[in-house]
Image (cartoon, helix red, strand yellow):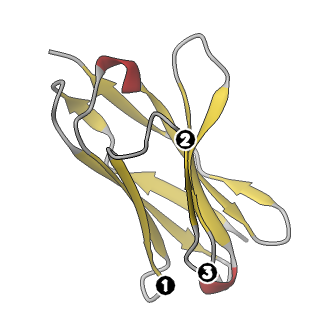
Amino acid sequence: QVQLVESGGGLVQPGGSLRLSCAASGIIFRLGAMGWFRQCPGKERELVATLSNGGSTNYADFAKGRFTISRDNAKNTVYLQMNSLKPEDTAVYYCWGFFSRDFWGQGTQVNVSS
């Protein structure tokens, strides 16, 4: 059974940083693409960043220069380092994995507010 479990969300002030983690189980982690999506209040889910099993990355425009996606295949974990956070980054952040089909985590809430 495939499971993706996010952690690391919370409340942070504007300009601050957070690192999200997503631990995967039930799959051969190194073979799949991983990524992060988010759903801001009142909006549809959108891509934040993806990372292929070959190391190629793709970022949404709003994430470029502020967010960094990385993975540790030995720990079956993908990370999202978020810096210079803005109030508009407030959202539920979802871990995504593609292993023959899409898999999703349950989401972790990020609130950026003073």
> Residue 12 location in percent, x, y?
19, 30
Q: Which of pointers 1 and 3 lies earlier in the amino acid sequence?
A: 3
Residue 60, image x, y percentages: 55, 41
- Say whether residue 32 is left or right of residue 101: left
Q: How many marks?
A: 3
Q: In the structure shown, which secondary structural element does the residue marked by tag 2 occupy?
A: loop
Crowd tier of the residue under label 3, counting other residues whose Cα lies within 10 Å: few below 14, some 14–19, many 20 or above: many
- Residue at the outermost top position: 42
Residue ID at (15%, 25%)? 13
Q: Amino acid at mark 3?
A: Phe
Mark 2 vs mark 3: give the one in front: 2
Figure quadrant of residue 85: top left
Kindly identify which residue carries mark 2: 60
Residue in view at x 34 percent, y 46 percent: 65
Q: Is mark 1 in CB contact (under 8 Å) with mark 3?
A: yes
Residue hosting label 3: 29
Tell me what residue is drawn at x 39 percent, y 27 percent: 89
The quadrant of the image that shows the C terminus is: top left
Distance, label 2 to label 3, CA atoms, is: 23 Å
The first of marks 1 and 2 along the sequence is: 2
Q: Position of residue 37 (x, y in %)?
A: 58, 42
Above-or-below relation of 85 to 72: above
Residue 41 x, y percent position in the rendering:
52, 14
